[in-house]
Image: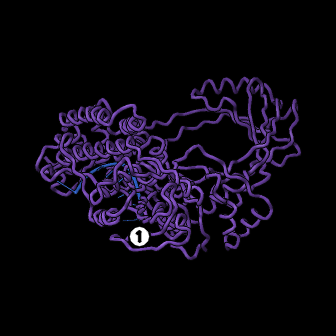
DNA sequence: GCAAGGTC
């Protein structure tokens, strides 16, 4: 029997082949440079020893597009909602497909080893379609699908021996997503390019695109920008109080439990009432043990947020660096949503690889030899395909490029922090009565730094030392006054915040969030603005106009907010759960998008006018 | 020339 196995990418194919082949694997080149074919034998239940070829694709095998007679100048954009869609291979995909066609010809069985997620299921389906071209005996019914989430010996052999079938519902869901994204993206993009025709002819703006992820991403940036613009500072008043004990070197600041009052008179009246008393009384002292928790195991989104915050790397740069480190075999697969380590991953073995490292070897040695190892926390997310990002090999930092160095060091330190104990300390909160008002002061003493020693990105410092107070103690006032202040405006959005917003609202995936941000920069909808060593995202005239224009048209379902994309995601889930069919969802969503599209067509002048008036306000030429 | 999703 001949079994053809196909993984989503070469690294997985190689890993699985090495496990199943038990070290006896022949490697051969394929028709595509990033794909290798691995030959070995494996004993499948009921089939006995089989000749296996393990190969892979490199992501999707096919793309979608409209036939050439539905090109830019052939049809009005609205027709794209019903236009036929063709499946096409890019030149690289053709090379990958050729390899599969060749290998499938004499295969008795096809076994799919793509990632166990929705897209992976669809890629499996694409592989089957290609394999059937040379071997029609291969069908959905007799194709095996391996279920696995990481490259570990017993897990992979179990997956090889217990295949299931491809999930046709997941295939349908992905098909639906692809079709909707293409139709809506192309229709709105072509239409918008038309609206801005005059400005595009003069090369003042280039492509004006719409995408179900691009627009909500832009919406987040513009939203914050407008909040900053429209911010009106508010005055507030509060009472600050200081107490100094004779034996203490410094007075202790107490803050008013009421916080801020936005009415000056009220604050003054309360203050004057209190002032009739020149002493205060300690109401209570509470001491608690407190902890600063070590971070959760590292996901892609967290990596990108952290690298943006700590190293000013863009989401794309940090993912690229992580990708390189992965290809070189230093870290695990960098695209993951999983934030808990699988139980069978040998963490101490991974740690011990770093015992001699120049930068953190001593820390690792004490972690292992002095019994300081602590099990990582377990988050609630699991993408069922990949473990959290962690180092798989040790390398000295000076052997890496600048960004790789930063990202690798972060990944290792994060991993070491995960395997260390939480930091702990004592926090004291003192409550004081002054007349009828309450005030509080608190202090922190860090007792054991633990993971903080290897994770400099978290700060937790011992604060002001509180003098020893006793309950009921009467203390003299050192100072008491009404202070005034103004509320401060929010800041423009940072990339860290944007990533968090996209993640929370289901805009893009861990692998694409960075690309969407790059895309709206490339489209000149937003710019990066560096101020005081921080990078902020600020919309351009075009970006603001688009969001404002679309918003003033008052669509039933806003295209600049995440709602529609979220709705699509939940409808796709319903396809997966067989609560709805692909046709139902497609129809429902096309109806929604078409309603928006025809309203945008009807009021397209509003979008252009918004842009023109912004140009006028900024002293720029307006084309007629 | 258009999207978003995989991957190198």
Depth order, front residue of A202/A122: A122
Which of the chains is purple?
A
| Residue tagged 1 | A36
Q: Is residue A520 above or below residue A427?
A: below
Q: Quadrant of residue A238?
A: top right
Q: What is the crowding at mark 1: few (fewer than 14 residues within 10 Å), some, or many (at least 20)?
A: many
Place of residue A10 in the rendered image (x, y in percent of width and height, measured from the top left): 44, 65
Place of residue A93 in the rendered image (x, y in percent of width and height, measured from the top left): 30, 62
In the displayed image of the protein, which residue is found farthest to the bottom?
A399
Depth order, front residue of A358/A340: A340
In the rendered image, is residue A305 in sight?
A: no
What colouring does the structure picture have? by chain
- Mark 1 secondary-structure assignment: strand
Place of residue A611 in the rendered image (x, y in percent of width and height, measured from the top left): 24, 44
In the rendered image, is residue A491 in sight?
A: yes
Q: Chain of mark 1?
A: A
Which of the chains is blue?
B
Q: Residue at x 75, y 62 (%)?
A: A367
Q: Residue at x 55, y 38 (%)?
A: A486
Q: Quadrant of residue A604?
A: top left
Depth order, front residue of A495/A48: A48
In the visual, does A421 lie left or right of B6? right
């Amino acid at each position: 029997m001949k079994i053809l196995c196909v993984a989503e990418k070469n690294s997985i194919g190689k890993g699985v082949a090495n496990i199943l082949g038990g070290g006896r694997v022949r490697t051969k080149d394929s028709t595509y440079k990033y794909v290798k074919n691995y030959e070995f034998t494996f004993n499948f239940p009921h089939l006995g020893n089989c000749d296996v070829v393990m190969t892979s694709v490199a992501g999707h095998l096919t793309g979608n597009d409209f036939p050439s007679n539905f090109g830019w100048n052939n049809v009005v954009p609205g027709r794209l909602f019903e236009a036929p869609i063709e499946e096409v291979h890019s030149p690289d995909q053709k090379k990958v497909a050729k390899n599969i066609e060749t290998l499938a010809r004499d295969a008795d069985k096809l076994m799919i080893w793509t990632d166990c997620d929705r897209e992976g299921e669809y890629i499996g389906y694409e592989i089957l379609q290609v394999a059937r071209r040379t071997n029609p005996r291969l069908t959905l019914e007799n194709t095996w699908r391996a279920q696995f989430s990481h490259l570990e010996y017993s897990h992979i052999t179990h997956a090889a021996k217990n295949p299931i079938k491809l999930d046709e519902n997941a295939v349908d869901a992905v098909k639906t997503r692809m079709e909707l994204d293409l139709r809506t993206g192309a229709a709105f993009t072509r239409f918008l390019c038309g609206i801005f025709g005059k400005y595009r002819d003069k090369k003042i703006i280039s492509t004006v695109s719409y995408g179900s992820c691009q627009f909500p991403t832009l919406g987040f940036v513009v939203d914050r920008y407008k909040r900053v613009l429209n911010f009106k500072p508010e005055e507030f008043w509060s009472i600050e109080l200081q107490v100094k004990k004779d034996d203490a070197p410094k007075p202790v600041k107490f803050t008013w439990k009421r916080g801020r009052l936005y009415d000056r008179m009220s604050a003054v009246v309360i203050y004057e009432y209190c002032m009739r008393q020149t002493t205060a009384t300690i109401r209570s002292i509470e001491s608690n043990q407190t902890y600063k928790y070590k971070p959760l195991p590292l996901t892609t989104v967290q990596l990108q947020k952290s690298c943006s915050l700590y190293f000013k790397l863009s989401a794309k740069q940090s993912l690229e660096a992580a990708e390189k480190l992965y290809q070189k075999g230093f870290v695990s697969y960098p695209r993951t949503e999983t934030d808990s380590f699988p139980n069978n991953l040998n963490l101490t073995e991974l740690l011990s690889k770093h015992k001699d490292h120049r930068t953190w070897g001593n820390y690792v040695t004490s972690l292992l030899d002095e019994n300081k190892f602590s099990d990582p926390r377990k988050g609630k997310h699991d993408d069922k395909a990949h473990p959290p990002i962690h180092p798989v090999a040790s390398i000295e930092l000076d052997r890496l490029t600048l960004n790789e160095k930063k990202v690798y060091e972060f990944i290792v330190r994060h991993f070491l922090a995960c395997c260390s104990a939480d930091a702990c300390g004592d926090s004291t909160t003192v409550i004081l009565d002054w007349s009828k008002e309450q005030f509080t002061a608190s202090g922190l003493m860090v007792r054991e730094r633990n993971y903080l020693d290897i994770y400099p990105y978290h700060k937790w410092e011992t604060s002001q030392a509180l003098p020893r107070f006793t309950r009921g103690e009467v203390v003299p006032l050192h100072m008491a006054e009404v202070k005034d202040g103004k509320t401060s405006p929010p800041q423009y959005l940072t990339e860290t915040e944007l990533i968090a917003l996209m993640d929370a609202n289901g805009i893009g995936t861990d692998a694409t969030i960075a690309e969407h941000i790059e895309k709206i920069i490339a489209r000149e909808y937003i710019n990066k603005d560096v101020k005081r060593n921080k990078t902020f995202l600020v919309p351009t005239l075009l970006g603001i106009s688009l969001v404002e224009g679309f918003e003033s048209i008052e669509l039933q379902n806003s295209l600049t907010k995440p709602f529609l994309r979220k709705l699509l995601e939940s409808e796709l889930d319903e396809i997966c759960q067989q609560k709805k069919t692909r046709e139902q969802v497609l129809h429902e969503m096309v109806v929604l998008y078409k309603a928006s599209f025809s309203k945008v067509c009807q009021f397209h002048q509003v979008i252009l006018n918004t842009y023109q008036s912004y140009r006028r306000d900024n002293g720029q030429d307006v084309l007629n």
